[in-house]
Image (cartoon, rainbow, N blue to C red):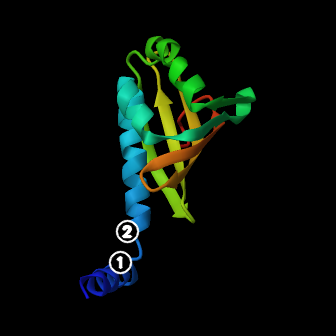
Amino acid sequence: MAGKHLAATLLATVLLFPGLPAFADQTVVERWYAALVTVDEDALSNLLAEDAEMKLLDLGVVQSKPEFLASLDEWREAAKGLVVRHRVEGTEDGVTTVLACYDFPANDVLMRETFAISGTRIVENIQTRLAESCEAY
């Protein structure tokens, strides 16, 4: 009987609060950027699914989770003094689209990123460079 009540409660929650999955995905994105700026390897590893792929379209690069994590030593140097401003443009079918300004000390870059999220893990991140400045942010 308790199982039926739990199932009914979960169903009611989803029906009454349809934005909850999107909110959960946005929380993952918030945690991602916080970990990326501080180069928190453990947090980044925990946020990525084991079979995650990182796609940097403008560079023609696709990285697996181990490849991405191995690149963090280089990123640590590049990210010194970095500030990332971002805003979620939308979430649909487990994919969250974000406009992000990477504000490095010497320059800034405007990116559009999509995050395919399953549960609390990123399964795919696609990054596209939009501009060499963040004026359009």
Query: Please, is residue 26 above or below residue 18 in the view?
Result: above
Q: Residue at x 52, y 12 (%)?
A: 74
Q: Camera-side residue: 6 or 10?
A: 6
Q: Residue 92: image x %, image y %? A: 56, 65
Q: Residue at x 41, y 54 (%)?
A: 26
Q: Camera-side residue: 11 or 61?
A: 11
Asked if residue 62 shows in the view, the reply is yes
For the residues labelled 2 and 1, the Cα–Cα distance comes to 6 Å
Q: Residue at x 40, y 37 (%)?
A: 46
Apparent side of residue 104 relative to residue 17 in the rendered image (left or right): right
Quarter the N terminus occupies: bottom left
Q: Quadrant of residue 112?
A: top right
Q: Residue 52: image x %, image y %? A: 58, 40
Report the residue marked by disc 1: 17
Question: In the rendered structure, which amino acid carries the disc numbered 2?
Answer: Leu
Q: Secondary structure at mark 2?
A: helix
Check contact, mark 2 vs mark 1: CB within 8 A: yes
Asked if residue 84 shows in the view, the reply is no
Q: Secondary structure at mark 1?
A: loop
Apparent side of residue 132 relative to residue 118 in the rendered image (left or right): right
Report the residue marked by disc 2: 20
Q: Residue at x 30, y 81 (%)?
A: 3
Question: In the rendered structure, which amino acid carries the disc numbered 1?
Answer: Phe
Q: Residue 60: image x %, image y %? A: 75, 29
Q: Quadrant of residue 13?
A: bottom left
Q: Residue 107: image x %, image y %? A: 52, 20
Neighbours of disc 2 within 10 Å: few (<14), some (14-19), many (20+)? few
